[in-house]
Amino acid sequence: MRLARGWWALAALMVCLPQVGHAQTPDERAVIQVVEDFFTAMRTKDVDLIERSMTPTAFLIGVGGRGMSQSTREDFATSISGTEAEWIERMWSPEVRVDGPIAQLWAPYDFYIDGEFSHCGFDAFHLVKIEGEWKMAGVTYSRAQPPACEKHPDGPPR
């Protein structure tokens, strides 16, 4: 009886301990890299990289303080190439789920324009694997201000 109580105590302790994240699979790492490449393309105004990272019919939908906005891949690429402003978007703690040829990445983000904080929220990237490569099929994101969302834990971009 005493041994049985000991096992129950151990089991209860294990449930209460924080869970250690699992190692990322190659597909999970590839999905994260596609999103990081997309952020790099935004910052550097690399329209070719934006187009390579997205399917031709990809869309972006933002919801928040200014209502809802929608754009196509081409609309987004045009807006990136048509602005002088530097756009910096950063995510952290991405959660990736993969099932065969589909994946989703969900992560908090913050967004800066010319070094000034603009907004933050959550990104939901929807990806498909086409001919062995992950591509974004859609991006849905919220737009908010603290305390409704948090800025990056590393502080402002440098």
Image: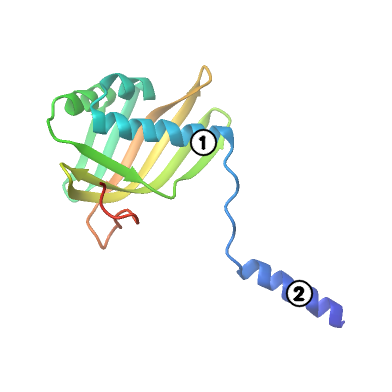
Give the mark, 1 or 2, whose residue is nearer the N terminus.
2
- Residue 151, by quadrant, is bottom left
Task: Give the labeled residue for mark 1.
Answer: 29
Q: Does residue 54 appear in the picture of this structure?
A: no
The kind of residue on which mark 1 rests is Arg
Q: Does residue 77 appear in the picture of this structure?
A: yes
- Residue 62, by quadrant, is top left
Instruction: Residue 29 in the image: state x and y as whole percent.
Output: 51, 36
User: Front-most of 101 and 39?
Assistant: 39
Q: Secondary structure at mark 1?
A: helix
Closer to the camera: disc 1 or disc 2? 1
Q: Secondary structure at mark 2?
A: helix
The kind of residue on which mark 2 rests is Trp
Instruction: Residue 18 in the image: state x and y as whole percent.
Output: 57, 64
Determine whether, in the image, residue 51 is placed left or right of residue 13: left
Determine whether, in the image, residue 37 is placed left or right of residue 81: right
The colour scheme of the drawn protein is rainbow
Instruction: Give the tally of numbered discs.
Output: 2
Q: Say which residue appears at 21% left-offset and 25% top-offset.
A: 75
Q: Say which residue appears at 26% left-offset and 23% top-offset.
A: 46
Q: Is residue 158 above or below residue 128?
A: below
Placement of the N terminus among the 4 image quadrants: bottom right
Extreme residue in the top direction: 131
Q: CA distance from mark 1 to mark 2?
A: 37 Å
Task: Give the labeled residue for mark 2.
Answer: 8
Instruction: Residue 116 in the image: state x and y as whole percent.
Output: 16, 48
Crowdedness of circle 2 by 10 Å Cα count: few (<14), some, many (20+)?
A: few
User: Front-most of 90 and 157?
Assistant: 157
Q: Is residue 83 above or below residue 111?
A: above
Instruction: Residue 144 in the image: state x and y as whole percent.
Output: 24, 53
Determine whether, in the image, residue 134 is placed left or right of residue 6: left
